């Protein structure tokens, strides 16, 4: 389904990003595994991809750093020849009620989740235009659709990703470049495992399907959007949340 394609997945050393990278490789793509701090886990992910017979590279870069993003993409275009799929998955949380939230924590989340998405897209914009093709998939969140108490910074960043996705879809559609977002709900990851039992039960009570999602649920949706099967879909936000956002 993705044979001959090259994908760049940000924040791909663990969790949902790792699952996306492995799933894209499983469908035939070569994968650039971006990470910020988890070098060993990123290298493990790249090794698994290579064991599938695909080409891989683990590349350190904080997406919050505009210049570093440019260097990463320049180097990877030289190494792989082209990049066809950009998955903006890298994200952080700094949860707190607004009354207790510092400006530093607000800015850190915006800089990584929203500006980081802008940074990679900005540096891939001209290469995609030159190719007259490309797939951009941005990871939003149910929190960006509904809002969530104690996550004003995170919700704002993900709502911003949704607006960015829709605007870019309009800009790039005439060049055969699609831009979509996937909005995960309550997914079983390291982040959600750190929640208290009461918080987990409260989240489950809001899910019509009455179960937690898996990273594979997100990865398969991303793989579909990255494929030719989704060539007539752009500017959309696909909620993978068990019905939370109904």
Image (cartoon, rainbow, N blue to C red):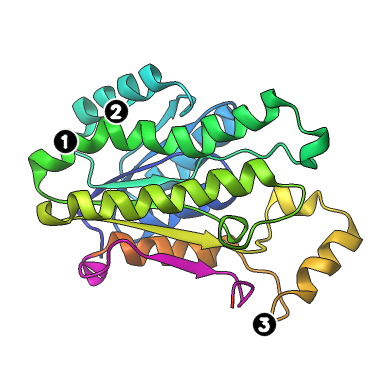
Q: Can residue 153 be seen in this view?
A: yes
Q: What stretch is highlighted in magenta?
A: 228-245
Q: Residue 96: say if magenta.
A: no
- Using the numbered discs, state the Cα–Cα distance from disc 1 to disc 2 in whole angstroms: 10 Å
Residue at figure coordinates x 28%, y 63% from the top left: 234
Q: Return the residue at label 3.
A: 209
Secondary structure of residue under mark 1: helix
Secondary structure of residue under mark 3: loop
Question: Where, by quadrant of the figure, is residue 227 drawn?
Answer: bottom left
- Closer mark to the observer between disc 2 and disc 3: 3
Q: Nearer the viewer, residue 89 or 81?
A: 89
Task: Give residue 245's position: percent from left, percent from top.
Answer: 60, 72
Label 2 crowding class (10 Å Cα cut-off): few <14, some 14-19, many 20+?
Answer: many
- Using the numbered discs, state the Cα–Cα distance from disc 2 to disc 3 in whole angstroms: 39 Å
The dot on residue 127 is: 1
Q: Return the residue at label 2.
A: 73
Horizontal side of residue 117 vs 214, given as left or right: left
Question: Where, by quadrant of the figure, is residue 228 drawn?
Answer: bottom left
Q: In which quarter of the image is the N terminus?
A: bottom left
Q: Is the magenta stretch mostly helix, strand or loop?
A: loop
């Amino acid at each position: 389904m993705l044979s001959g394609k090259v994908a760049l997945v940000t924040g791909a050393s663990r969790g949902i990003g790792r699952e996306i990278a492995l799933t894209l490789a499983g469908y035939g793509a070569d994968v650039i595994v971006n990470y910020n701090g988890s070098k060993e886990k990123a290298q493990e992910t790249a090794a698994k991809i290579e064991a599938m017979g695909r080409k891989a590279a683990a590349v350190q870069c904080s997406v919050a750093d505009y210049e570093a993003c440019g260097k990463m993409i320049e180097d990877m275009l030289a190494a792989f020849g082209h990049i066809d799929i950009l998955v903006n998955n890298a994200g952080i949380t700094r949860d707190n009620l607004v009354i207790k939230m510092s400006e530093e924590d607000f800015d850190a989340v915006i800089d990584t989740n929203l500006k980081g998405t802008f940074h990679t897209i900005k540096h891939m914009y001209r290469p995609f235009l030159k190719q007259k093709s490309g797939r951009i998939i941005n990871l939003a969140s149910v929190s960006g659709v509904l809002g969530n108490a104690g996550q004003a910074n995170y919700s704002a960043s993900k709502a911003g990703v949704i607006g960015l996705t829709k605007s870019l879809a309009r800009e790039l559609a005439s060049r055969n470049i699609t831009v979509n977002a996937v909005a995960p709900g309550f997914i079983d990851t390291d982040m959600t495992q750190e929640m208290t039992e009461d918080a987990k039960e409260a989240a489950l009570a809001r899910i019509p399907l009455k179960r937690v999602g898996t990273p594979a649920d997100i990865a398969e949706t991303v793989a579909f959007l990255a494929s030719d099967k989704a060539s007539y879909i752009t500017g959309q936000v696909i909620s993978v949340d068990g019905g939370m956002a109904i």
